[in-house]
Image (cartoon, rainbow, N blue to C red):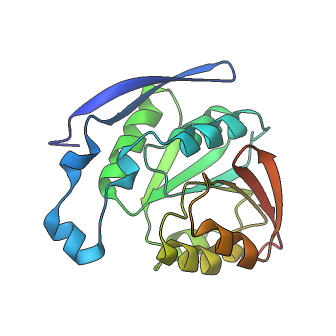
Amino acid sequence: MEGINLVEETVALEGLSLSILRPLEAEALLSEEAFEHEEYLPYWAELWPSGVTLARAVAQRAVEGLRVLELGCGLGLPSVVAALGGARVLATDWSAEALEVTAANAERNGADVETALVSWSEPETVVDRAPWDLVLGADLLYEQRNVDQLLSLLPRLGGEILIAEPGRPAAGRFFEEIGFAVTPLAKRVYRLTGPAP
């Protein structure tokens, strides 16, 4: 986290008060070189409403003993909540900086969260460990390429997925093509169930 100016936010969920670090200014993390290489934008650096909503949904579930995977963990809030609920959690992101902040957020809240650098185009790290009891993702469908990658990846991970989705344009196609049963759990939180890999 060297060179990243972090600030603390308190997030209150279902009897939990969590201390979450996030970069003071996400725009300060923009890199012309990284953008040219992979159109890198530091989406991970914000405490998005979808992440808070998903964390709230996880806090309301019995997750003790479950193997939980979070895709695109960003700041790691849903992963921290799942770990505090007794789940064995692997939080993944394609940004090493996101994983450093997630690990710091887990530690400061007394949660045991494993992290791994994972690209959805090279997902062997998580596919090899499937099936997962529960897969989490918040606001993952912001670009069309994400939809294509997730349509390929999610059926290989497990039978239950919680997705928090704020209504991005690409989400419609994702939900039409995923091939899982889709059940709304809360406003903008969806439970996807399908066959285990």
Q: What residue appears at the point 72 percent right and 70 percent down from the top-left corner?
A: 175
Q: What residue appears at the point 45 percent right and 53 percent down from the top-left corner?
A: 115
Q: Position of residue 179 (x, y in %)?
A: 79, 77
Q: What residue appears at the point 32 percent right and 57 percent down from the top-left corner?
A: 96
Q: Position of residue 89 (x, y in %)?
A: 59, 48
Determine whether 160 is above or below 156 in the image. Answer: above
Q: What residue appears at the point 73 percent right and 43 percent down from the top-left corner?
A: 187
Q: Position of residue 189 (x, y in %)?
A: 71, 49
Report the quarter where the N terminus lies: top left
- Marker count (numbered): 0
On the image, which quarter does residue 21 sit in?
top left
- Judging depth in this view, the residue of 180 and 176 nearest the camera is 176
Q: Is residue 64 left or right of residue 105?
A: right
Residue that sits furthest to the front in the current view = 169
Residue 86 showing in the rendered view = no
Residue 169 showing in the rendered view = yes
On the image, which quarter does residue 155 sit in?
bottom right
- Judging depth in this view, the residue of 197 and 189 nearest the camera is 189
Q: Position of residue 49 (x, y in %)?
A: 54, 40
Determine whether 39 is above or below 47 in the image. Answer: below
Determine whether 84 is above or below 16 in the image. Answer: below
Report the quarter where the C terminus lies: bottom right
Q: Is residue 165 left or right of residue 185?
A: left
